[in-house]
Amino acid sequence: MRYLHTMVRVKDLAESLDFYCNKLGLAEVRRMESEAGRFTLVYLAAPQDRQSGTGNDAPLLELTYNWDTEDYGGGRNFGHVAFEVDDIYAICQKLADQGVTINRPPRDGYMAFIRSPDQISIELLQKGAALPPQEPWASMANTGVW
Ligand SMILES: C[C@@H](O)C(=O)SC[C@H](NC(=O)CC[C@H](N)C(=O)O)C(=O)NCC(=O)O
Ligand code: NI
């Protein structure tokens, strides 16, 4: 298992990129736009982490910008901590056998969500898996997972 990123939700993407990049010194390594989900994901890496890897392998900060404004009161600006796993079905079964609730099962072989005892959202992403054609969040709308 490898640590991937921490996700935070941002209200103003330009303002956040100015802060994290121009001020804090992080650099954008990639971004993804979702028309279906109406959001943008921007992945940032710290300079020394980028020097040590290809950028894609560096531990990252994932900014989530929802195109439809949301009020992130009550800690909703924090999203999740993500880890890459070798076998998402096996680790979810092991966790379930240990009594952990799999809030979002890995039915697409790509992504699963669990929560810590303090309800911290933890995302598990299958190593080497491509984004499924049916964007995984499309099936999560209004499920209360986030
Ligand atoms: C690619 C992988 O690293 C992701 O984090 S995609 C996870 C997905 N994100 C969204 O749907 C973003 C928009 C959504 N409205 C939101 O604000 O989260 C997701 O499943 N998010 C749920 C979560 O708890 O992070
Ligand atoms: Ni993520």
Image (cartoon, grey):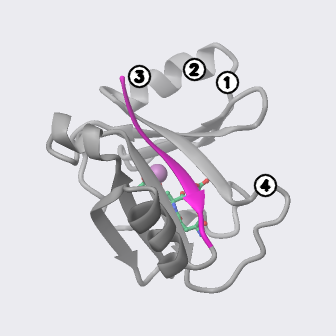
Residue position marked by numbered label 1 in the rendering: 100
Front disc: 4 or 3: 4
| Amino acid under disc 1 | Val
Residue position marked by numbered label 3 in the rendering: 90
Residue found 69% across the figure and 29% down from its top: 116
Q: Is mark 1 within 8 Å of ligand 1?
A: no
- Which of the two discs, 2 and 1, labels the residue nearer the N terminus? 2
Q: Is mark 2 within 8 Å of ligand 1?
A: no
How many labels, in total?
A: 4
Q: Considering the image in quadrants, where does the N terminus appear?
A: top left
Q: Residues within 10 Å of mark 3 (few under 14, many from 20)?
A: few
Cα–Cα span, label 4 and label 1: 23 Å
Q: Residues within 10 Å of mark 1 (few under 14, many from 20)?
A: some
Check if mark 2's residue and mark 1's residue have beta carbons within 8 Å: yes
Provide the secondary structure element on which disc 2 rests: helix
Instruction: Determine whether, in the image, residue 78 is placed left or right of residue 53.
Output: right
* Residue 98: image location, x then y, percent: 64, 13
Nearer to us in this view, 70 or 145: 70
* Residue 10: image location, x then y, percent: 60, 69
- Which of the two discs, 4 and 1, labels the residue nearer the N terminus? 4
Please indicate, yes or no, whether residue 46 appears anywhere in the rendered image: yes
Check if mark 4's residue and mark 2's residue have beta carbons within 8 Å: no
* Residue 117: image location, x then y, percent: 76, 26
Residue position marked by numbered label 4 in the rendering: 75
Provide the secondary structure element on which disc 1 rests: loop
Residue found 21% across the figure and 47% down from its top: 55
* Residue 121: image location, x then y, percent: 64, 42
Cα–Cα span, label 4 and label 2: 26 Å
Cα–Cα span, label 3 and label 2: 9 Å
Q: Is mark 4 within 8 Å of ligand 1?
A: no
Secondary structure mostly seen in the magenta stretch:
strand
Q: Which residues are magenta?
A: 1-10
